[in-house]
Image: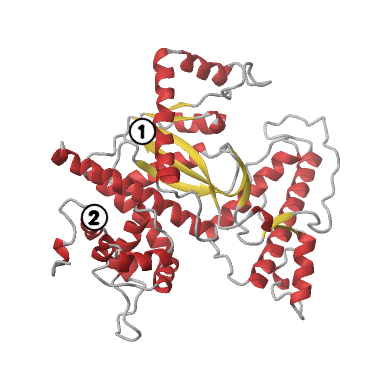
């Protein structure tokens, strides 16, 4: 090999581009985690580790052991790692320790795309793709089996017994504004949404040992039941009052329902309790619903995850995330048009987005449906159908698939990233933002080398 690292790779190689890009990023969040008094074993330079992970993700090498091996065998990895070879434990611990900071690299890369003129906001397409969790469907276990295994493995009462929620009276099940004569499923759906939001904010890591995971799974199943009890209680109180939010009397009463005493029969995944069994085009998988917003240059503007099969109810959250990312990188402009498929149709959220001055094109009917759903006629439904029937509206909507599907295909097929390596909602979110950040980084690299090669 030539004596100088600078001669190991040709000019314009992606490795040099990654090193230059990392040099422009604000990595203060990484450095803040280290001691400044000189005590302890010297750590690898955070700039080196960030560049190594970004380059690895871009080259579809995410396993810490494979990255360790590449730092010895692959010339480009040796250049990025400054001819050092961090071991796989160091790489894995760095990724775990700086989970939030690594997720924040998405914004740093997006800012570089803004400076290069790649962030145009005429039309923004929104969609989700199902990504496997680091867990199998066979790990979905019933409450009874979990309790049995805990009793078999432990000689003492569960150390988290004091955290039981009892009848759920202390759980904030529903917001004060939720005053609608919806059925029990509607009340429970809203209660579960609030619970999932709280769990997402807490971002608790998944325990490594199986006994600890089993105790956490049992606690969550009991918490789910407590939330159901609270929702049923609040619904009963609402109907007992006999008056809806608009002042009208309620004449029809729901059938009485009493939740079970224990979460018998309910399942949770004991490998990754945050993941869910999701319906996908190829069947059911255990994983997460990875959401993205993409512009017409296929640059990802926002990347978030949830654990719900349906995209219903996630239109406004991903639009909010997009506006938040743009504001964070100094872009005050807003998308002119947001397009999404029929799964995102949500009347109230569509109205809320339009009120901000952003046009929304989302068909209220699925592609294979020939007639409108009962009650989905007239008003905003008929208006959206008329918009889609026009040449301009139809052309804008047809852009959606060509904008966002190639981005998902590049990440999941070309780069073979269709499964998260780490467990837990927060870890999966950090990975998804790293995956989309490196997608943008490669877009930026191709954009910059295009004039030279052209």
Image position of 358 with respect to 305: above or below: above
- In this orientation, does residue 321 appear? no
Q: Nearer the viewer, residue 254 or 267?
A: 267
> 212 left or right of 340?
right
Q: Position of residue 88 (x, y in %)?
A: 41, 71
- In this orientation, does residue 59 appear? yes
> 84 left or right of 360?
left
Query: In the image, which disc is placed on residue 21?
Result: 2
Q: Position of residue 209 (x, y in %)?
A: 61, 72
Read off the residue under disc 1: 335
Q: Residues within 10 Å of mark 2 (few under 14, many from 20)?
A: some
The quarter of the rendered structure image containing the N terminus is: bottom left
Q: Nearer the viewer, residue 208 or 337?
A: 208
Query: In the image, which disc is placed on residue 319?
Result: none
Q: Position of residue 131 (x, y in %)?
A: 52, 48
Choose mark 1 or mark 2, whichever is in front: 2
Q: Nearer the viewer, residue 182 or 82?
A: 82
The quarter of the rendered structure image containing the C terminus is: top left
The residue at the point 25 percent across, 56 percent down is 18
Q: Position of residue 108 (x, y in %)?
A: 30, 53
């Amino acid at each position: 090999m030539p004596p100088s690292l600078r001669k190991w790779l040709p000019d314009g190689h992606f490795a040099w581009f990654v090193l230059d890009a990392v040099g422009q990023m604000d990595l203060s969040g990484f450095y803040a985690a280290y001691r400044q008094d000189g005590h302890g074993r010297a750590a690898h330079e955070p700039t080196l580790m960030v560049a190594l992970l970004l380059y690895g993700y871009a080259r579809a090498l995410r396993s810490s052991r494979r990255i360790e091996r590449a730092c010895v065998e692959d010339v480009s990895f040796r250049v990025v790692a400054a001819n050092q070879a961090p071991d796989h434990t160091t790489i894995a611990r760095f990724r775990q320790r700086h989970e939030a900071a690594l997720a924040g690299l998405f914004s740093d890369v997006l800012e570089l795309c803004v400076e290069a003129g790649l962030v145009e906001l005429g039309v923004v397409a929104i969609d989700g793709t199902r990504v496997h969790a680091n867990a199998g469907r066979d790990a979905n276990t019933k409450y009874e089996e979990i309790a049995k295994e805990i009793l078999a493995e432990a000689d003492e009462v569960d150390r988290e017994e004091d955290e039981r929620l009892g009848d759920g009276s202390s759980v904030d099940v529903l917001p004060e504004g939720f005053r609608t004569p919806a059925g029990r499923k509607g009340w429970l759906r809203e209660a579960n949404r609030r619970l999932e939001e709280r769990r997402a904010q807490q971002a608790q890591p998944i325990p490594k040992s199986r006994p600890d995971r089993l105790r956490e799974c049992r606690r969550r199943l009991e918490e789910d039941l407590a939330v159901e009890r609270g929702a049923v209680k609040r619904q009963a109180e609402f109907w007992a009052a006999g008056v809806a939010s608009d002042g009208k009397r309620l004449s029809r009463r729901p059938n009485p329902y009493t939740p079970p005493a224990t979460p018998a029969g309910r399942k949770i995944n004991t490998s990754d309790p945050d993941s869910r069994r999701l319906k996908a085009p190829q069947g059911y998988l255990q994983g997460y619903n990875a959401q993205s917003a993409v512009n017409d240059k296929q640059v990802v503007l926002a990347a978030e995850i949830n654990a719900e099969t349906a995209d219903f109810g996630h239109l406004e959250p991903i639009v909010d995330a997009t506006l938040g990312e743009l504001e964070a990188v100094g872009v005050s402009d807003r998308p002119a048009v947001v397009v999404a498929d029929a799964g995102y149709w949500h009347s109230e959220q569509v109205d809320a987005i339009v009120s901000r001055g952003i046009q929304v094109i989302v068909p209220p009917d699925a592609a294979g449906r020939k007639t409108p759903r009962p009650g989905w006629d007239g008003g905003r439904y008929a208006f959206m159908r008329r918009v889609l029937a026009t040449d301009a509206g139809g052309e804008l909507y047809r852009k959606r698939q060509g904008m966002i599907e190639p981005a998902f295909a590049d990440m999941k097929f070309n780069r073979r990233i269709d499964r998260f390596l780490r467990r837990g909602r927060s870890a999966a979110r950090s990975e998804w933002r790293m995956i989309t950040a490196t997608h943008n980084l490669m877009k930026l690299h191709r954009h910059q080398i295009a004039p030279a090669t052209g």
